[in-house]
Amino acid sequence: MHPGAAQASRRWPVDRWAEVVRGLRARGAQIVLSGGPDERERALAVARRAGLAESAVLAGRTRPLELAALVARARLLVSVDTGVAHLATAYGTPSVVLFGPTDPALWGPPADRPQHRVLWAGRTGDNFSGRVDPGLLALWPQHVVDAAGELLGASPVR
């Protein structure tokens, strides 16, 4: 799971990420949190709120090639629309990608790849806003957990 993003408009709230972590762990998923060095504090906050061990927070502890390898081996990636989501598409790693201000038809995984789920409220916004996009806030943790559960039930063990 990759809870960070460079733009504030794409930063889904920490408490919602934590709820997704709890929901997926309840289904038996093993969770690690990825991110860059500047996203480590956010990932740690998600872990604390979700009851996830700090050792599962890889944010700020992986180099780009290590992150790419992690995505390539994952059973599933859950992320907002950011670079790591594009890695999942490139590697064929199943993904649930949350879109806020950007149109997934332009920036999301190709529609003909059923191993990816796009969650989007259907409206574009200001990608460079200093606040979380209202469309992203229209997405709830249960939407993410349900989409992830569908993919985890269908994905091969990696």
Image: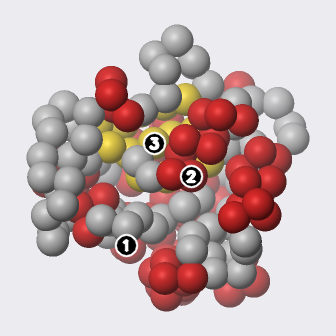
Q: Please name the residue shown 25% across and 41% down the image.
A: 102
Within the image, what quadrant is residue 2 found in? bottom right
Residue 54 in the image, given as x and y percentages of width and height: 68, 86
Earlier residue among tags 3 and 2: 2
The answer for how far apart the CA atoms under marks 1 and 3 are is: 17 Å
Within the image, what quadrant is residue 152 found in? top right
| Residue 28 visible in this rendered orientation of the protein | no
**Quadrant of the image for the N terminus?**
bottom right
Q: Residue furthest top?
A: 112
Q: Look at label 2 and name its amino acid.
A: Val
Between residue 39 and residue 18, name the one nearer to us. Answer: 39
Between residue 21 and residue 64, name the one nearer to us. Answer: 64
**Residue 81 vertical position relative to residue 19 in the rendered view, above or below:** above
Q: Look at label 3 and name its amino acid.
A: Val
Q: Please name the residue shown 71% across and 81% down the image.
A: 61
Residue 70 in the image, given as x and y percentages of width and height: 77, 56
| Residue 15 visible in this rendered orientation of the protein | yes
Give the residue pinned by disc 1: 15
